[in-house]
Image (cartoon, grey):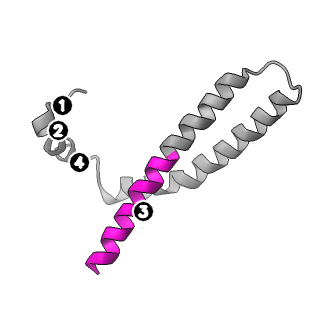
Amino acid sequence: MIVPEDKSVDAILGLGLIDNQNVAILRTYIPQMEDAMFNLAHLLYLTRVGFSGMDEVAIKNAMDLLDRVTGDLRSIFTTEDMVNNLSE
C-alpha cells in the first residue's frame, strides 16, 4: 500500500492497526527473534566447521537482517519507555 507522504501518519493511524494489543505483541517478538538469531548463529557455526548442504552466506545474511529488525524494535520500545517514564 502506498500512502501519500503528507497524509501517511494519519492514514496509517486511521486504519486502526496501531493499538495497544499490537504494540504488546510486537514487544513479545523480541525474545523470539533473539532465539532465532541464536539458532542461526549455531547453524552458521556448524556450516563453518563442515556441516554441508546449507548456504553459509544466506544464513549470515538472515542473521544480520534479523539483528537489524530486532535492534529497531528494541530502540522503539526503549524510546517509548523513556517517554512514558518522563510523563509519569
Task: Give whichever of discs 1 and 3 has the lower sequence position.
Answer: 1
Task: Give whichever of discs 3 and 2 has the lower sequence position.
Answer: 2
Q: Are marks 3 and 4 in contact (CB under 8 Å)?
A: no
Residue hosting label 4: 16
Examine the rendering and report whether any part of residue 25 can be seen.
no
Describe the element under mark 1 as helix, strand or loop: loop
Task: Give whichever of discs 3 and 4 has the lower sequence position.
Answer: 4
Residue 21, placed above or below residue 41? below
Give residue 78's mark. 3
Residue 17, placed above or below residue 88? above
Q: What amino acid is labelled 3 in the image?
A: Thr
Q: Residue reaching furthest right?
A: 50
Residue at point 22%, 27% (across, down): 2
Residue hosting label 2: 8
Q: Which residues are magenta?
A: 70-88
Which residue is at the front of the view, 43 or 68? 68
Q: Main secondary structure of the magenta part?
A: helix
